[in-house]
Image: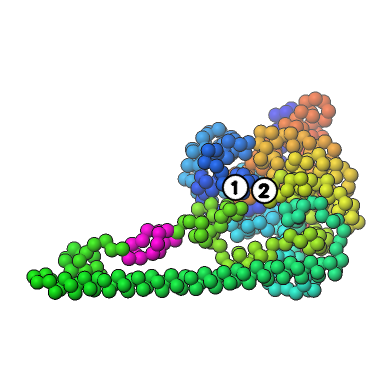
Amino acid sequence: MAADLTELVDELPLVDHHVHGATAHDLSRRAFEELITESDRPVPAWMTMFDSQLGHAILRHCAPELGLDPHTSPEEYLARRARLGADEVNRRLLGASGVEHYLLETGYRGEEILGPGGMAEVTGVPVDEVVRLEQVAEQVAASGCGAGAFARRFAEALWERTRTARGLKTVVAYRHGLDFDPSRPSAAEVAEAAGRWLGEGEAVGRRLGEGEAAGRRLGEGEAAGRRLGEGEAAGRRLGEAEAAGRRPGESQAAPDDAPPGRPGGGTGTGPDDAPHGGSGGGAGTGPDDGFRRGPERRLGLVQDAVPVTAADQRRRGWRVTDPVLLRHLIWTGLDRGLPLQFHTGFGDPDVDLRRADPLLLRGFVERAEPTGVPIMLLHCYPYVRHAGHLAHAYPAVHLDVGLGVTYTGARAAALVAQSLEVAPFAKLLFSSDAWGPAELHHLGATLWRRALARVLGEFVAEGEWSAGQAARVAAMVAAGNARRVYDLTAPRP
């Protein structure tokens, strides 16, 4: 009976209701390892991220999809991955996940990964968008907007951006914390906060613009210096040639083996001979080489590094963190009426885990209840039981254990079991929250299936549930609940 249930769960189609795109780039070992951790710090030289639950899960469950034995070595795995190339790795791992529909959140470094169209092309299944509220607000600010017009402009932009979207997402847990004032801010409060934020953003933009102008002037000065140096070198070579011509018995012509343009031969020391990264030319690889470092280190670790542009820097000046504005975005999102996702719990060091407990949303959930908008609690680890309480108490609240499943690996069944304690089964959904390497997409599905089959199998083996009940609940959580909440059975808007 347990084997039958495992087979049934393995074959269930999944709706991944919160996921990001896969990377289309080949990855170095360093790049790969720094994309299989939520830390934003470089992996220390004395350790490897393969020595983790996630690392072991990759070698156990992803290796066979790439034609290797389970539990292969990291070196063999990465060598095989490199030989196959990113496109083939994506095709194999995404194809083997059994996901029938992706809801793709595109607001986090979307330029580095596959978007909805790219994911649909690779997987051959429907891909719909989940729109991040904070990104829309930052785009409105960057486009030029007065404080008094911000609320209207944001509402208009949100409506336009979500014409075909299935859901909304907020990262208030990262930008402030879930302990925000749950009430809707007044129009006057929003205008005042927008004035502060827009003024700060413009000041940052001016400073960046001044820095760019100074950089251009410095570059022009360096170019002039190089030209002057080239002229001085040419003058020295001319003087040497003239001196050679005045010496009795010596020819003014260069010897037959001299390189063109260099009378008398030699290797030269001009700018064309400078190694890359050295003075006199080359791309450079130091900390000022124009690639992202530090907390955004992942951007520069893909082998095709992404240069920092002026537009990137200007956008950074518009990062919305004002609690009044964050509340306004959330309430405007409720007005839009689409399911609203909240990051809760585990994440990278930007999140203060103490302030990411979903229980902190209780006041907001109660105030939002009359709208009827579904509130989707993402990840929830280590607060799965807290989220379960909210889902039990409030009809609009739903949850998943997405990111926690991937990172707990062989212990994922413990999280799935907690999610099945007090939360009504109609409130549970599947997600992977995968971003980047397709291993994360594959493991999000594989580890969740194995964990669910194990937990439900124990219920059946102990006589607490029937096999039919277990099969029905598995199908609900795998896809049925998401189809209902996001209205996926209806034609795309």
Front residue of 217/444: it is 217
Within 10 Å of disc 2 (Cα), the crowding (few <14, some 14-19, many 20+) is few
Q: Give the magenta part as a residue range.
A: 270-283
Real-space CA distance between mark 1 and mark 2, rounded to the nearest whole angstrom = 9 Å
Element under disc 1: loop
Label 1 belongs to which residue? 41
Dominant secondary structure, magenta: loop
Residue 453, given in percent of the width and then of the height, sits at 72, 34
Q: Residue at x 22, y 64 (%)?
A: 265
Question: Residue 279 lies in magenta, yes or no?
Answer: yes
Mark 2 is on which residue type?
Pro
Does residue 232 appear to the left or right of 74 in the view shown? left
Is any part of residue 7 visible from this angle?
Answer: no
Residue 201 lies, in percent from the top left, at: 69, 68
Q: Residue at x 75, y 30 (%)?
A: 457
| Mark 1 burial class by Cα count in 10 Å: few <14, some 14-19, many 20+ | some
Q: On the image, numbered disc 2 is attached to which residue? A: 349
Q: Find numbered disc 2 in the image and state the secondary structure of the residue it sits on.
A: loop
Reply yes or no: does residue 245 show up in magenta.
Answer: no
Left or right side of 382 for 124: left
Task: Count every numbered label the image shows and give the total.
Answer: 2
Q: Residue at x 69, y 33 (%)?
A: 411
Nearest the camera: 397 or 277?
277
* Image quadrant where one finds the C terminus: bottom right
As shown in the figure, which amino acid type bears the numbered disc 1? Arg
Q: Is residue 485 left or right of residue 301?
A: right
The answer to whether marks 1 and 2 mark residues whose Cβ atoms lie closer than 8 Å is yes
Question: Which circle's residue, 1 or 2, is located before the other in the chain?
Answer: 1
Placement of 416 over or under 314, stated as above or below: above
**What is the quadrant of residue 417 in the picture?**
top right
What residue do we see at 74% from left, 27% from top?
1
Residue 110 visible to the viewer: yes
